[in-house]
Amino acid sequence: MLKLKLTNVSFIRFFSKNKKLKVFLLLALPLLAILSCNTTEPTDEIKPGSRNYEWTLDTLKLKNGDFLTLTRMWANSSNDVWTIGFGDVSRNLIWHFDGNRWSTDSIPRGMSPTGIFGFGSNNVWLGTAEGAFWHYNGSTWSEISKHSITGYDRVVIENIWGSASNNIYAVGFAENYVTSEYKAILMKYNGLKWDFVQIPDLQLSFTNIRQQQSTGLFIISAYNLAGTNNNNRLIIYKGADFTEINAGNSSTTIYDMNGEVYITMGRKIYKYLNNQLTLWKDLSSNFFGYGIYGKTEKDFFSFADAGISYSKDMVGHYNGTDFKILLETNLHYTGAGAYVDNNIFVTAFDDSSNSSVIIHGKIKE
């Protein structure tokens, strides 16, 4: 690209004092201007992602009688992936993938992990159904703090997300067993400790939280545990303000990719743009279920189902043009996934063997 920018005043004056160079300047500038105007800047066009993946199904080996359903996952790299869930015993609820195999330390910790997020191999956080936060330092898990609210019997941490190791948020709910009352909770870690964020008294469970890089707004998904209709909620959080922007019956989940937040409701994907919920992709005619795990808007994976029968769950891929099924299974997707280093991990359950399975797709070189 040929481009000239004359901004130095002394440089221009030097040319104007010399008659021959002045003539050259007068003749050359129009040509340079034409060349500059006709030259286009290169654009970083997003290319459709590859669908050339090889797949493996990793069954997590449990002791006889043990039960495990995986519900959360976080990946630092393709050889450092964590997944958690709930089951009959506490010793098999935290699993790790080292690039070769999945393993658990089988240590009974007396807690039920419900949320996981991290910032490196030695900095991983767990939230629990007992209102506690656990931390992994690269070698061991330790309980850091445990929280309660007066008038409520328990605090449940549903999910954890953060933008930095000293700016982490957790969402969930508090419950009173006797009155069956619920209260939404929001907590923050500032690098030193976890504290409750003062919020309005909302009779909801906050289920997930993400922040838009472009606006700084937080988007929170919520559920009305005591309701019978329009239980799925979507809330915008800014400062001390909580604004509900949607209530409906369609399952509502939120994801982030490259700093952008995506909301799935039914078989549609939405964004929050210009202060309103905006439809981004309508995939109702496809088997799209939910989930946004990938690199770009032209390269992400999602859970898919067989529509009316729901007899088998599948892994689908969107490449910017269409949504295509890449893998069909007889498994049931259990709600978690992660994409890292051209690897996609999805949690599932095998009814026939009563065991948890990790669906692992790796791009072919």
Image (tube, rainbow, N blue to C red):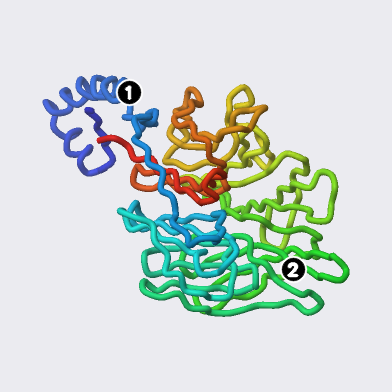
User: Residue 260: percent from the left, percent from the top?
Assistant: 52, 44
Quarter of the picture containing the C terminus is top left
Instruction: Tell me: 312 left or right of 248.
Output: left
Q: In 3D space, how far apart are the residues under numbered discs 2 and 1 (Cα atoms)? A: 62 Å
Disc number for residue 12: none
The residue drawn where x is 61% and y is 55% is: 209
Category of crowding for the residue at label 2, using alpha-carbon neighbours closer than 10 angstroms: few (below 14), some (14–19), many (at least 20)? many
Q: Is residue 91 above or below residue 246?
A: below
Give the left or right position of residue 353, taking residue 156 as reference. Answer: left
Tag 1: amino acid: Cys
Q: Which residue is mark 2?
A: 174
Between 319 and 163, the one nearer to me in the picture = 319
Q: Where residue 33 sits in the image (x, y, percent)? A: 29, 24
> Which residue: 81% across, 44% down?
230
Residue at label 1? 37
Occupied quadrant, residue 242: bottom right
- In this rendering, position of residue 13 left or right of residue 322: left
* Residue drawn at x 63%, y 65% as measured from the top left: 157
Q: Amino acid at mark 2?
A: Ala
Query: Answer yes or no: do the residues labelled 2 and 1 have beta carbons within 8 Å?
Result: no
Residue 45 makes an appearance in the image: no
| Residue 212 is at least partly visible in this image | yes
**Figure disc tally:** 2
Q: Position of residue 120 (x, y in %)?
A: 38, 64
